[in-house]
Image (cartoon, helix red, strand yellow):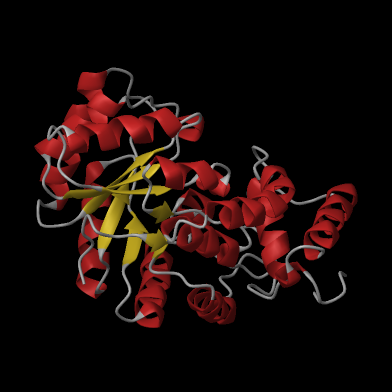
Amino acid sequence: MLLDAKAAGLFPIAPTPFHADGRIDEASVETLIARYLAAGATGVTVLGIMGEAPKLEPEESLAITQRFIAGFGKLPVIVGVSAPGLAAMRALSHAVMAKGAAGVMIAPPRTLRTDDQIVSYYAQAVEEIGRDIPFVIQDYPLTLSVQMTPKVIRQIVQDNPSCVMLKHEDWPGLEKISTLRGFQRDGSLRPISILTGNGGLFLDFEMERGADGAMTGYAFPEMLADVVRLQKAGRRDEAHDLFDAHLPLMRYEQQQGLGLAVRKYVMMRRGFIACDAQRKPGSALSAAAKAEVEFLLARLARSDRRAADLPKAA
C-alpha cells in the first residue's frame, strides 16, 4: 500500500540492532518487528536518524527495509532516504519502493538557509525520485539546523502532490501544528498527515493541537500508542496521567548525543533487542547513567506495569 494523507496512529522510528562487534543483529530485527506490532504500531519508519542509517552499507539498508516490509505485512513502511546527493536518494527510493515500501522520508540538508532554498530543494528531490512516490517532510531543526516556517511547509505541500505527511519535530512546535491546521481550515492547505517526533516529549499536547499520531522511537512505544488512542477518544485526563508517568524517562532519553544509547539500553532491558551496541562511531552509557536509568525504570513501574518485571540488569 502507498502512504497517503490519512496515515495516523503510531509509526515507531526503528533503531538498527547490532551485535557488539558491529554486525547487524538479524534475530533482533525480527523481535523488534514483533514487539512493535504488539505495541499497536500502525506503521513503521526505518533508516531514520536514530536508525544509524549513515553507518549502513547500501545492501544493508535494503536488507533491513525488506525485513520490515515483510514483517509489517499490509501496514505501511516508510523509509528514510535522505542523502548528500540526489542520485543516491533516487537509487534508494526506487529500490525500496520496488520492494514494497509505502513511501519515503526526506530531510533537508543542513546547508539550506533561505525559504527559497528549502522550497527549491524539495522540488528538485521530487523531480529526481519521481512524482509517483509519496514522501514525508522531516522538519527537525534541532538536529538539522534548517528552519521551516508553516508557510514554507504549506508551499512544499501545495507544490508537490506526492507530499502526504509532515514529520513534525520542531521545538517549541505546538503553534506550528495549530497554524498548519488553520491553513487547512481556511482552504489554503490540502489535508496532510502530521506525525510528531522529538522522542514523544510533547505528544500529549501535540495530539490536542491536531497531530494524527507519533513517529518517534521512545523505548515504550505502547505508551505512545495509548496516548494517541486516549486522546482520539477524548479521554484527556487519562492520556495526560499516563504520559506524565513516563515523562522523567522520556526527558532523560532526550539528551543530545546520548539519547540513542539510553533508548537502546532500555529496549535491551525490555527484550526488544538483544544488545544495546551502536555501530562505530557511537556513544555508550556510563555505569552512573545506567544506574540513573534503572532508578527511573523502577519509579515508572509504580504506575505502569510494563516497566516492571524486567530481567535483572547485568
Q: On the image, which quarter does residue 214 sit in? A: bottom left
Question: Residue at 16% across / 36% down in the picture?
Answer: 189
Give x and y (percent) for residue 135. Answer: 23, 51
- The residue depicted at 59 percent of the width and 77 percent of the height is 28
Horizontal and vertical percent for residue 233?
A: 44, 61
Query: Which quarter of the image is occupied by the N terminus?
Result: bottom left
Q: Quadrant of the C terminus?
A: bottom right
Q: In the rendered image, which quarter is residue 273 located in?
A: bottom right
In this rendering, would 176 be left or right of 91?
A: right
Nearest the eye: 273 or 250: 250
The x, y position of residue 274, in whole percent, is: 68, 75
Is residue 161 positioned above or below 99 on the image? above
Residue 142 visible to the viewer: yes
> Which residue occupies the foreground of this view, 78 or 303?
303
Residue 114 appears at what percent x and percent y? Answer: 28, 17
Q: Is residue 67 above or below residue 51?
A: below
Residue shown at 21% from the left, 32% from the top: 183
